[in-house]
Image (spheres, rainbow, N blue to C red):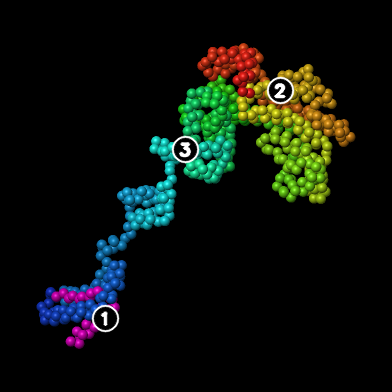
Amino acid sequence: MSSICFWFDCVWLWSNILKMDKFIIRSKKPSSSKSNDSSSNIQAETNRTIETNITTEISSTTETSKTTNTHKNKTTNRTENITTESNNNGNPSTTEAGPSEDEASSQKKYKQKYKTSWEVHYSWLQCVNESCFCKICFKSLENNKKNLERHHVSERHVTKQKNESQMMSIPSLFQHANTCDSDISKIKAELMCVMFCIKRNLSISNMDALPSLISNVCPDSSIAKTIKCGRTKATSMINNIIGPFSQSLIVEHLKNNKFSIIIDETTDVSSTKCLVLVTRFFNIVTNKMTDHFFALLELQHSDSQEIFSSLKSIFEEKNIALTNIIGLATDNASVMSGNISGVKAKFLQINKNLFFLGCTCHSLHLCASAAFKKFPDYLEKIIKAIYNYFAHSPKRIGAYKQFQEAFDLKTNNILGLSATRWLSLESVINRLLEQWQGLQHYFNLEAFENQNSTVNISNFLMNSKNKLYLLFLSYILNLMNKSNKLFQSEFTQIHLLNQVMQDLFLEILKNFIRLDEINVDVNFEDSALYMPLSDIYFGIQLQQHINKNLNEFAEDELFDIKNNLLEFYKELCNQIKKRFNFNNKKLQLLKYLDVSQIANGSLMSILPIFEEFPHSSQNVEVLNMQWRFLLGNNDFINKYHDP
């Protein structure tokens, strides 16, 4: 009996240690030995007694430990399975059993696959690389429905979804079928604001402030209050609506009419080579010649073949016939204007009647730049050095203003020479001549005090012969810039080109060639045709300066200076003759398109012009009748002609 009590105490202690809900010891009946029947009966009776006592004892502690045991039982397997078995020899054995195969497989990590059924409940969901992706937040999510639900109710997602629902798509703005008049008025107002920036080349960022400005200026306008168009919406309207629509109008016109193209290369800040394409045609709506930007083509190389191929591709893409191109305008680079392999030559293979014209302004720049090389090299270097000395120093500019006030000079800044626009040298030189006295005294003081690079500038300013060069350049560059500005006009001036360039050429010749020998075909290299050196005209300011300071110039020094100026004249005439053909029949006939020439009866029929420009045979007789109607009809021309 003492052994039974000892066993009961052990079991009770063990159950409290493990905190188990139940502890049942079952003993199987031995099957191999009959000699143990009596001991088995005793053992079975003992087990039933122990089970009854254990159940009664543990029931009092079950309620307090149930909560803790339940949590542990859900997260872990039972630590031990105690089984008392009898082997064939009747010897009982106790074994520890590990987890079953089903329990081991349940512990493996399982990756949830994407289910299309989730998209029914979450409209913002889409599948990207077999994973969940939020179209509103642009965020990848785990393939888990609980995770999707958490994201669906998150504050960030809810806010973005609300903003998304309030935004209208650009195409929906222009679907007027179901919109009221107020909505249409709002759309028109936003379009007008965007077009305001486009026409005046204003930054699109202005659209962030323009609608609020209009609303404040017009507080009583219901339309002004509804305008909501920032830079993002304005950019979308330009790229998706205004741009494609405008280009479609241009394309439609180019398909059915003749036109000219203007092309030029450019390089952006990322060093990407691009080709700008502008079309020029007669607009039947405005009854005027108009220029329209057509495309910006990216180039890998700048050779003539790629430029031509890019142009050909863009026109073929829009179904525009290359034979509709009747005019080509470019700069004077050989890649563009070359007669053998240039872009011009490749277009002439398609249309032999193509009219080509190089940039007149660019040609004049090159003429003046080449002639300037006849002067001493230091001249341009000193002009740049004077500008650079003041350019980035507010201290020096402030000090020089004291000299301007002392000599009663205008408080203007010194100008810099443009590297690509050589004729801008005129304004630079005029500013130096205006500030000459103040600059002389300022750089004399700088050279005396600092003994630095200003010594060369001071010596240049104190030498009177250098001022003679600047006075001459002021005169001749002004003469060239008058012609240059004429061809920068927004109005059509091509009919004046031949006459203006011829007048400029003859004006230069009159300065050093005898008047009885002057014509466009004169041999200006023949010194026998020259005036005496003392009679050659170099500008009235230069002659006045010589007369006032005659004692400062040696006779041989003046002779050398005037010879250099004469060489400038000769080289300038040579460059103009290279770049302009005064005997070009097409350019000569274009002058008769001036209404005043028609009224004078200089050309009785339009036939000579048509023979040089045979691009259209339609209504030639009608055009000629209108031409002849204008002959001598000055009253009609004065009444209706818009100069």
The crowd level at tag 3 (other Cα within 10 Å; few <14, some 14-19, many 20+) is: some
Query: How far across and how far down the image is residue 643, in percent?
Result: 63, 23
Disc 1 and disc 2: Cα gap in Å? 127 Å
Residue that badge 1 annotates: 13
Determine whether the residue tagged by mark 2 lies in a helix, strand or loop: helix
Examine the structure image and report whether residue 16 is included in the region drawn in magenta. Answer: yes
Mark linked to residue 503: 2
Q: Which residue is drawn at 72% across and 24% down?
A: 505
Q: Residues within 10 Å of mark 1 (few under 14, many from 20)?
A: few
Nearer to us of marks 3 and 1 is: 3
Residue range highlighted in magenta: 1-29
Report the amino acid beneath label 1.
Answer: Leu
> Of the residues shown, which amino acid type is indicated by label 3?
Ser
Whether the magenta-drawn stretch holds residue 592 is answered as: no
Q: Disc 3 designates what residue?
A: 185
N-terminal label among 3 and 1 = 1
Q: Which element is circle 3 on?
A: helix
User: Contact, CB < 8 Å: mark 1 with mark 2?
Assistant: no
Q: Is residue 285 visible?
A: yes
Q: Where is residue 624 in the image (x, y as percent from the top left)?
A: 57, 14
- Residue drawn at 67 percent across, 38 percent down: 419
Residue 325, percent from left and from top: 53, 24
Quarter of the rendering containing residue 339: top right
Q: Give the left or right position of residue 503, taking residue 308 as reference.
A: right
Is residue 305 shown to the viewer in this render? no
Residue 152 image point, x, y percent: 37, 54
